[in-house]
Image (tube, coloured by chain):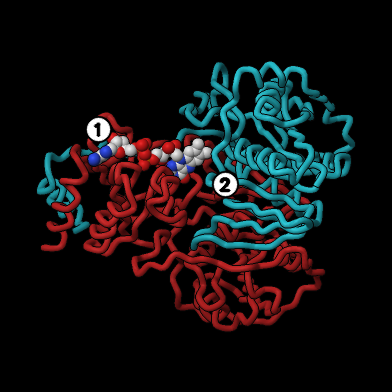
Amino acid sequence: MSKILLIAEHDGATLNPSTAKCVACAAQISGAEIDVAVFAEEGAAVAAQAAELQSVSKVLQLDNPANANALAATLAPQVSALADGYSHVFGPSTTFGKDLMPRVAALLGVNQISDIMEVLGSHKFKRPIYAGNAIVTVEASPDLPVVATVRTASYQAIEAGNSAAVEAASPDADLPTHTRFLEIQAGKSDRPDLQTAAKVVSGGRALASAENFDLIFKLADALGAGAGASRAAVDAGYVPNEMQVGQTGKIIAPELYIAIGISGAIQHLTGIKDAGTIVAINKDEEAPIFEVADIGLVGDLFDIVPQLTEAVSSQ
Amino acid sequence: MEKILVGLKRVVDYNVRVRVKSDGSGVETDGVKMSINPFDEIALEEALRIKERGEASEVVVVSVGGSEAQQQLRTGLAMGADRAILVVTESELDPLTGARVLMELVDREQPGLVLLGKQAIDNDNNQTGQMLAALWGRPQATFASEVVLNGDTAKVTREVDVGLESIDIDLPAVITADLRLNEPRYVKLPDIMKAKKKPLDEIQFAEMGVESAVPVANLQFEPPQQRAKGIMVDDVAGLVSALKDKGLL
Ligand SMILES: Cc1cc2nc3c(=O)[nH]c(=O)nc-3n(C[C@H](O)[C@H](O)[C@H](O)COP(=O)(O)OP(=O)(O)OC[C@H]3O[C@@H](n4cnc5c(N)ncnc54)[C@H](O)[C@@H]3O)c2cc1C
């Protein structure tokens, strides 16, 4: 039987939605027993949120001042000590999980399965490679622990309504002091979070300035949408890095994605493959974005977007 | 510091539209343009800038792969690396074995810093740097967008989902490069000529004394699901009504 240890992602107060998506993936493994580990300075509030998730057997609360900020070098030895007796260790394929899980895998002496998008069996999964241009079915050895990250865009968050037991735990591990947290500069935004928003409006290089990105923000606000960007727009400094969508930015799966002045490079498209409806607005009818768009509109964004914002606002 | 070690992987160029072979045994690589993994190129550029600022004296580029990877190492030498090491293997190594090879090279070369790309754009694994740091028992600073060295420590800014995180790490350490760390230089023709004279050592993987890890088996490759063909609308009114039809407005 599979016994899965799942590493929760949180900011010290709130459980990140990526965790409920990971649980949804883990629950696809038939008969799996799922324990969620919360590493924090004081994790009671987060542990209580994790205990509400369906399919969770128990929550392990690992309080330690050293866990105040998620540093892979500090967490990995604790996770690998805790992993004893588990057949699987899962984390989300967010920057948190991508940083931590391979370090855990190496300590356990195994390769990692990155970005699980489908569960075919306890040791058999599908994952994307080549920026999503190919999907590979992989199989891990049944004799070794499976360490994996879950491509969160492939899963809907599992429902709440559970009340799993919460237990304190303190694995025996030497914690290094060679890595020190300094600060985090989080973008301040009242808009829905890009990774969970039902609707997302993104702008590309064509916006041509930070000021013009207001067009994107106004449309996003009219729709109640999150706002994203292509790499070119981030590189040019129009918007901050946390807005980048794509292979090396965020992989998202909103119901509606509106790409404005974005050409549709493969590295961008891989971030939106799972969107419900893709709308493209681009002045070049040959732009590759139209090959994946469900609804396309050829024209100048500087004419179209203000009109669209007005039309949406008057709905 | 004396030395920086930089990993360069030979991968299908990022502009190539990769196709899955019709028998599902892999992706088509015959006659396809190969390049240095773009993230590794950024890692190398950062190492070169550190050396040019006088904060390191030697940049060594290493690759693990077939003898064709000489080409990418020569490009790295042309960019400005001082020497190259190719660990020759017939088959592609899994990330953990690759990290063990790098660990063996770290033992031999004793670098003050290892710079790698955050992921290779072929398998998109995003594992090797973190694994090397674990095996070495040293700090890791992944997804770096800024690196400031201060003697025995470094301050690294990392691109994370909520924004930018900065951490302070002791050296030696492993840093993996994200896209915005820098813009790699172009190689000039005279540099390509000069690079031909720089040392490129080959070591057979089998002679390194590295134990192979158990790989995750790739059973079957398939193309991604295609999206259904969409519609074109003529104006904003058309777009609004199409969105309404789908219940999105
Ligand atoms: C290793 C690697 C990783 C990458 N990762 C990512 C990633 O995660 N995310 C990402 O987005 N990119 C990524 N890229 C970059 C990607 O290849 C493209 O360069 C980038 O997506 C292009 O951004 P863009 O579409 O905004 O710009 P462009 O390609 O320049 O497209 C601009 C578009 O705007 C249109 N346009 C111009 N003016 C107007 C107007 N007035 N009205 C309407 N349309 C107009 C043009 O027709 C064009 O189609 C990566 C590249 C590499 C090498």
Q: Which residue is mark 2?
A: B181
Residue A87, position in %: x, y?
Answer: 70, 59
Disc 1: host chain: A
Q: Is residue B94 visible?
A: no
Residue at the location (55% across, 50% down)? A116
Neighbours of disc 2 within 10 Å: few (<14), some (14-19), many (20+): many
Residue B82, position in %: x, y?
Answer: 76, 30
Residue at the location (27% across, 57% down)? A214
Residue at the location (61% across, 76% down)? A59
Would residue A69 be found to the left or right of residue A229 on screen?
Answer: right
Residue A3, position in %: x, y?
Answer: 66, 64
Q: Quadrant of the C terminus of chain A?
A: bottom left
Residue in front for this viewpoint, A25 or A104: A104
* Label 1 near ligand 1 (CB < 8 Å): yes
Q: Secondary structure at mark 1?
A: loop
The chain painted red is A
Kindly indicate the quadrant of the structure image that contains residue B198: top right
Q: Which residue is mark 1?
A: A284
Q: Three-letter amino acid code at disc 2? A: Leu
Is B86 drawn above or below residue A98 in the view shown?
above
Is A96 drawn above or below residue B116 in the view shown?
below
Pointer 2 with pointer 1, Cβ within 8 A:
no
Is A249 drawn above or below residue B47 in the view shown?
below
